[in-house]
Image (cartoon, rainbow, N blue to C red):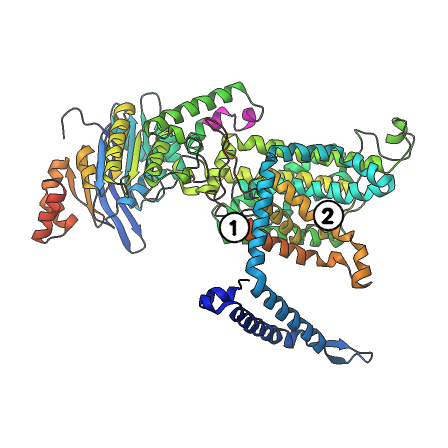
Amino acid sequence: MTGRGDRREPALDGGSAGVLTALKDATLLALLTFGLSFPIVAFNTRQDLTQGLVLEARWDLVATACAVVFLARFVWTLFGPTFWRGGNAVVQRAASLVRATGISVDHVRWFGLAVLVTYPFLAVWVTGPGGAIKWIDNFGIQILIYVMLGWGLNIVVGLAGLLDLGYVAFYAVGAYSAALLSTTFGFSFWLCLPLAGIFAAFWGILLGFPVLRLRGDYLAIVTLAFGEIIRLVLINWVEVTGGAAGISSIPRPSFFGIPFDASPDGFAATFGLDFSPLHRLFFLFYLILAMALLTNWITVRLRRLPIGRAWEALREDEIACRSLGIDTVTTKLTAFSIGAMFGGFAGAFFAARLGFISPKSFEFMESAVILAIVVLGGMGSQIGVAIAAVVMIGGTEILRELGFLKAIFGPTFDPAQYRLILFGLGMVAMMVWRPRGLISKREPSISLGAHKAISGVHVKEGHG
Amino acid sequence: MMAGRFETLLQVENLTMRFGGLVAVRDLSFSVGRGQITALIGPNGAGKTTVFNCLTGFYKPTSGRIALVRDASDPAAAIAALTNSPRRHTRSRSTEVYLLERMGDSEITAKARVARTFQNIRLFQGMTVLENLIVAQHNALNLASGYSLLGLVGAKSFRAAERRAVDLASYWLDKIGLLARADDAAGELPYGDQRRLEIARAMCTSPVLLCLDEPAAGLNPRESGDLKELVLDIREETGTSVLLIEHDMSVVMDISDHVIVLEHGVKISDGTPAQVRDCPKVIAAYLGVEDEEVVVAEAEIGK
């Protein structure tokens, strides 16, 4: 047993010194916990029946917290390093096993695509027509929306290196323009979709202009503010946007003019099928899948074009770009507008899918989640972003499915409430083991000989 | 000047650059000859890099004129006519004159074809060596890709343009001896190779004037020997004029045709290497006024 204390003390002292140090360390930390929790946790104010404030002491909670911290620290000090090394060894082992099987990113890509294409059928086959609704809608469609948003933001953050904390604004612009165009002018979904993309791209350029000269923290703050401005306008411009109540009864997308309903002209009747709500979901699923794949295809293509290389060069060194005659203004604006356009497409889909939108769906948290997807996936990596979206959004949805835990933790236990804690833990773990995201290697856009991936160590994260 | 052969490419007149109360460059005038290697030297803080930043548009000069004459039958008249007009450049079949002080940084490289390197190397470290050189050809390629539209559908004309870009990159990689490392990340290269790669990248913009900011800094004697050959080779093969800032006197004295000495933002000497080397003002100002130091300095510059 080699505790951390052993390394500090002279080597001859052996294990007992380790235990002593661990005890001391744990006691200190328990005291610290006591100090922290004493005012905050120990006293709870509550209104009683006469509306008076009552002070409740919760010493049992404080004692539990201190005990937990003491034990955790004690065990960690004694066994932590061993455990740490073990964990690292397991990770390395797993990595080498994966390498040994010869699975490459390419395999993952094709396997992922195959799963995606067959997913709705798999869901029906496994859970039956009733159970599949949830799996296709909450998991499939929901995740794919975030994959698409992640890929859109990846252009701005991952490729061009411009930190955008207000990406949800473009999602909102897309959703609201599609909703307003269809409810006001009766435009069909297929007309609203490109228009929403164009509007969002326009707003992307509009945001781009004032932030052209900003970098780093300043850029982040201005984009953050932009996201909030859009949301506040949506809430307060009641005559147009319906304010906090949002816009409802947005026409649902039709199958090229054939509605998904039980009427004689409906999809089911036209194709001689029995009416089922699954038809619409299948359609929506494949629609968002096609849109996401189109986003991916365009992004991958653009990366190998001069404009994509200019984005990456901009991320690496803006001054060098200028010295090579690259117009950084148009380069930044194209990144903002193309990224925003994909956000707008996703927004139009979002509006049509639910038939109802409100500013609630476009809060800062959404921007943060999309950015987390891009960062966790590995900035610039398409497949990494897709995996991160599955893990983050799928993980959130899975938490709702863990109802059986109520049997262990009591009937008031709601696993979904622990979403953010798990996010936090996941992020910390990622930053420790994979600080550059799931896929940190960069694929060169052109090569003389064989393609060689570039280690993430050299790749910059951008300055803005 | 040497009669007949000396033709001015770049003419700097009364250039002044002020940062608040500090005058970094004061009333500086000099010229860079076409097809020549011109060195700009001076002690630390003399304003050399400031001059570079003015030439390449990274700073907007407080006052003065920087004229680049690529083609004109009567340069003086063409410059005067352009100065009196609000335009930034004249581009016709027989006359091509640019007023760099009116142009922005990327515009200067893209249109006037002045390329530069940096004192602290600025490569795209996470991109491959080849990608660095392809990015340098961005403007031509972007045009060939129809601003991405033709490129997106994989048009033949774009693919041909890209092949030509790779050929040009390979040519320069071969010149600097890095062809074998074309697909490695630029950040993986040793320091000396990074310096040469930055020069090759600047050359991929097909410049008429190449500005090198301390290209030999941090190089060992063998590497700075290679560098001298590279610069001479560039001039020989492409006819590109070179303006370089350098502290390594062996490089300056060996390869330059023309040396300009700055001190505290003011020009104190201007002439051939031999003239400058003998100028007492230069020796005193550049290396100190003590007699012993002059002796040491003379030994250093190989007198």
Residue B149 magenta-highlighted: yes
Q: Residues within 10 Å of mark 2 (few under 14, many from 20)?
A: few
The amino acid marked with disc number 2 is: Val
Q: Which mark is residue A395?
A: none
Residue A72 appears in the figure: yes
Q: What amino acid is found at the position of numbered circle 1 in the picture? A: Leu
Cα separation, mark 1 vs mark 2, equals 30 Å
Mark nearer the viewer, 1 or 2: 1
Q: Chain under label 1?
A: A
* Mark 1 residue crowding within 10 angstroms, few (<14) / some (14–19) / many (20+): many
Considering only vertical position in the picture, is A314 above or below A25? Answer: above
Q: Main secondary structure of the magenta part?
A: helix
Which of marks 2 and 1 precedes in the sequence? 1
Q: Quadrant of the C terminus of chain B?
A: top left
Residue placed under numbered mark 2 in the picture: A240
Task: Name the residue tied to disc 1.
Answer: A219
Q: Position of residue A409 (x, y in %)?
A: 78, 63
In percent of the image, x 69 and y 72: which residue is there? Answer: A64
Q: In this rendering, would A429 be left or right of A213?
A: right
Determine which quarter of the picture holds residue A36: bottom right
Q: Which residues are magenta?
A: B141-152
Image coordinates of residue A338 in percent, x first then y, are 59, 37
Answer whether labels 1 and 2 touch (C-beta < 8 Å).
Answer: no
